[in-house]
Amino acid sequence: MSAKLIDGKYVAELTRNQVREDVNHWVESGNRRPFLQVIQVGTDPGSTTYVRSKTRACEDVGIETDTNRLPDTVSAKQLKDLIRTHNENDGVDGILVQLPLPAHLSSHDVIESIDYRKDVDGFHPMNVGRLAVDQPTFRSCTPAGIFELFKHYSIPVKSKHAVVVGASNIVGSPMAIMLSRENTSGKATTTICHKFTKDLTQHTISADLLVVAAGQPEMIRGEMVKEGVVVIDVGINRVADETSEKGYKLVGDCHFESVSEKASWITPVPGGVGPMTVAMLMKNTLLAAKKSIYPE
Ligand code: NAD
């Protein structure tokens, strides 16, 4: 089998077009434009790139945005005081603190200081908890984007065996929760693997649906998956490439050539999951502005 490509760039564009239309309608109905406050601590080039793509997406769909850039020496108190001013500002609908944070700051502590009604990343324990009990919530953007891809390509999830490799709070865990829930989301039989899993192949080979978010370049190879599997490769890894002007190229957590030989569907890297994450952030910001999840 040779896999069909899941085109995240295209589906993200459709999603953004829909958000733009909804934002226009919202504003034409007499409401102010949604507003996303971004906070970046330090000057990590990866974070700068992500912040740029998020603020550009805001401009594209008509969401207002501003970025606070703080030095990497900022104290937890200073950062949380700033977040508190945004929490209390009725003109701010969504607050996003770009991760990772410098080592002296606890991301748990910082995320918990965001008003959960403005947590458009869906990382606050209140929103993760509501996800786990099938209640309306800000779903974290990467898993939510993957579910949009399933929907767009009519990829069945219910009753399948889904295997998630990676159990981080921002991707693997919420993905596994969404896949496994019986009422609102995936309804799949779900296995979660992580760095302590023994014999990873024993699990990946039985997957009908494989989501990989481990941050390990090309770790999953063709011999580790079964014929016809649907593969969602979340990984974005920079590896050295002398033939490229930048000196590196981006690869996923799957070895694309060998895995796509056996898969029925696969996401490319780049152009798969990444653009969906940003599109879902736009959707969550509009939901926050409309107070759709937490009515007043
Ligand atoms: P993380 O480092 O926080 O978590 C990695 C997870 O993978 C952990 O649970 C760890 O136990 C597991 N893991 C690591 N090595 C493993 C191995 N050999 N076998 C099995 N499990 C293993 O990473 P993260 O923030 O979840 O990100 C994962 C990847 O996804 C990264 O490449 C990141 O850049 C990418 N990412 C992409 C998007 C997107 O929008 N496409 C969004 C977020 C993260």
Image (cartoon, grey):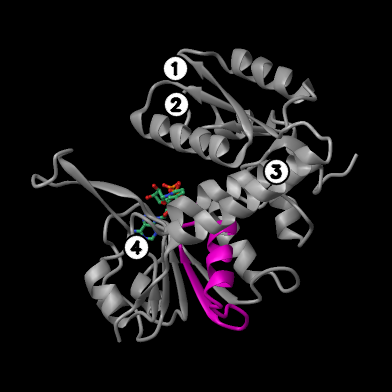
Nearest to N terminus: mark 4 or mark 1: 1
Q: Position of residue 92 (x, y in %)?
A: 72, 27
Q: Which residue is mark 1?
A: 72
Numbered disc total: 4
**Left or right: where 119 falls relative to 67:** right
Q: Secondary structure at mark 3?
A: helix
Q: Are marks 2 and 3 in contact (CB under 8 Å)?
A: no
State the residue at coordinates (42%, 57%): 234
Q: Which residue is mark 3?
A: 23
State the residue at coordinates (26%, 80%): 261
Nearest to N terminus: mark 3 or mark 4: 3
Q: Secondary structure at mark 2?
A: loop
Residue type at mark 1: give it. Asp
**Left or right: where 178 falls relative to 45:** right
Task: Point out which mark residue 268 bears.
Answer: 4
Q: Position of residue 12 (x, y in %)?
A: 51, 55
Q: Position of residue 191 (x, y in %)?
A: 52, 71
Q: Compared to 293, does 197 lie above or below?
A: below
Read off the magenta span.
Answer: 144-172
Q: Is residue 30 visible?
A: yes
Real-space Cα distance between discs 4 and 1?
33 Å
Q: Are marks 4 and 2 in contact (CB under 8 Å)?
A: no
Q: Secondary structure at mark 4?
A: loop
Residue 168 drawn in magenta: yes
State the residue at coordinates (29%, 74%): 259
Q: Give the label, 3 or 1, closer to the camera.
A: 3
Residue at the far front: name it. 28
Task: Count residues near mark 1 (Cα–Cα under 10 Å), then give few for <14, some for 14-19, many for 20+.
Answer: some
